[in-house]
Image (cartoon, rainbow, N blue to C red):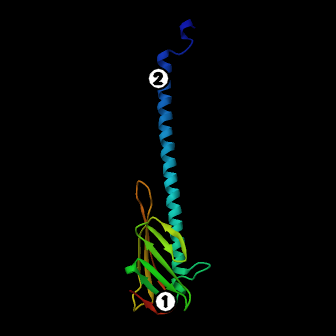
Amino acid sequence: MDNHDQGYTLVEIIAVTAIVGILIGVALIMVTNGLGYATYAHSWFNAQTKMTRVINQIAFGSASLPGIAGATDVEELNSGKGLHIYFGAAEQVSYIWDDVNRVLRLSTNPEPLLDNVTLFEVSAPADSNMVEFTIEVTLPSPRNRVLSSTRQVLIRNKMVTGL
């Protein structure tokens, strides 16, 4: 064995260092993109879960309030941008879409029920006991994805009025 065969040349070390640096850079980009997609998927899931909860609350009620299905009367507000639900002579609740601030509010609570609402439409024909409402939520992201859901609910009494 010769004395000059005992190590790597400077060119070999520089080449290996450059290849390892490129591989680390590619791995870092993949991890960063993966974290971005995970964050986006998390916000999508949260928005979808919250929207489903609000839709079910409007349609079927919550622990403290009955929904459309348990109402005695339903009325459109603001040309279909809101919904007034009656539960008897003294009990009532309204869901109102603030299209300027893009939030859906409950009349009994100043806090928004749902954020980033780009559409809330209600259709309650006077000659029907069926109420239809649509909610669209736009996710605040570079993609501006839209979640949309339409629900038809049958109220128990036929007293449906529209303005």
Residue under label 1, please give it: 73
* For residue 56, side relative to residue 76 (left or right): right
Asked whether the residues under the numbered discs 2 and 1 touch, taking CB atoms below 8 Å apart as contact, a structural biologist would say no
The answer to whether residue 120 of the structure is visible from this angle is yes
**Label for residue 98?**
none
Reply above or below: 9 against 94: above
Neighbor class of circle 2 (other Cα within 10 Å; few <14, some 14-19, many 20+) is few
Nearest the viewer among 114 and 51 is: 114
**Which of 31/116 is in front?**
116
Provide residue 9's location: percent of width, then percent of height.
50, 15
Q: Position of residue 91 (x, y in %)?
A: 56, 87
Seen from this angle, which residue lies furthest top?
A: 3
Q: Residue at x 46, y 80 (%)?
A: 83
Residue in the image at 47% along x and 86% along y: 74
Relative vertical location of residue 101 with respect to residue 79 in this rendering, above or below: above
Left-right relation of 59 to 123:
right
Count of numbered labels shown in the rendering:
2
Q: What's under tag 1, amino acid-wise?
A: Asp
What residue type is disc 2 on? Ala
Residue 2 in view, yes or no: no
Give the x, y percent position of residue 92: 53, 85
> Reading the chain from its start, which is encountered first: label 2 or label 1?
2
Quadrant containing the N terminus in the rendered view:
top right
Q: Closer to the observer: label 2 or label 1?
A: 1
Question: Which of the image's four quarters has the C terminus?
Answer: bottom left
Image quadrant in which you'd find residue 131: bottom left
Q: Which residue is mark 2?
A: 15
